[in-house]
Amino acid sequence: DGGITQSPKYLFRKEGQNVTLSCEQNLNHDAMYWYRQDPGQGLRLIYYSQIVNDFQKGDIAEGYSVSREKKESFPLTVTSAQKNPTAFYLCASTQIPGQGRYGYTFGSGTRLTVV
Amino acid sequence: GIQVEQSPPDLILQEGANSTLRCNFSDSVNNLQWFHQNPWGQLINLFYIPSGTKQNGRLSATTVATERYSLLYISSSQTTDSGVYFCAVERWNTGNQFYFGTGTSLTVIP
């Protein structure tokens, strides 16, 4: 079955460490997105990419970095510059950027905790 | 960005009851979707509905784009309907970004 796979489901980070969250899709979608969700809140956009080797900052990109070397993959690195990284991270994709008529598909998320 | 407000923030229903969730947005949009987030965090797309009315089983949604609101109806609620319902909107000239509301947390009790 097609879908989005995020790994790991749970991740613990020590202060000062960089960690990378994986997002892989086999839906042949063009656009991929990273969102952050804090308790009791909606989702906020970190980064998005509409095409390989190109990506754009969202509303809260500071302290994060991404790459899009392959259409299927859009990993997110949470750097030590992100002062409050504890959150639930969701990856999404859609086939036609900006239209969404096929719907946005979300992965099952990664819960990151700073210890 | 576009402001998205959802109401009510919390809702508790007896199994079998009906409910209406509302989403107001501050500007014209090209895309509106309703999502259900289950207790494990998975977001499921319920409706793509920038305008008009759609139905899928016990769920239906209506968007009145000219008045900038959307409604999600849940009939004969079941415990499996519990979770958080999000409305998200998109306008294509704003960088293809989805703006999410803060959600309605629904608990259905047996």
Image (tube, rainbow, N blue to C red):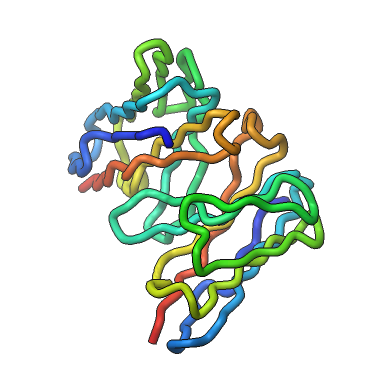
Locate the C terminus of chain A by quadrant.
bottom left
Total numbered badges shown on the rendered structure:
0
At 71% from the left and 63% from the top, the residue drawn is: A67
At 32% from the left and 26% from the top, the residue drawn is: B24
At 35% from the left and 34% from the top, the residue drawn is: B4
* Residue A57 spot, x, y in % from top left: 58, 53
Q: Nearer the viewer, residue B54 or B92?
A: B92
**Is residue A1 at least partly visible in the picture?**
no
Q: Nearer the viewer, residue A51 or A113?
A: A51
Horizontal side of B59 relative to A96 (left or right) equals: left
Horizontal side of A55 relative to B90 (left or right) equals: right
* Residue A1 spot, x, y in % from top left: 72, 52
Horizontal side of B88 relative to A48 (left or right) equals: left
Q: Is residue B2 above or below residue A8?
A: above
Q: Is residue B93 above or below residue A52?
A: above
Q: What is the quadrant of residue A47 in the picture?
A: bottom right
**Is residue B49 at least partly visible in the picture?**
yes
* Residue A103 spot, x, y in % from top left: 60, 36
* Residue B13 spot, x, y in % from top left: 19, 40
Q: Is residue B99 above or below residue A52?
A: above
At 40% from the left and 74% from the top, the residue drawn is: A83
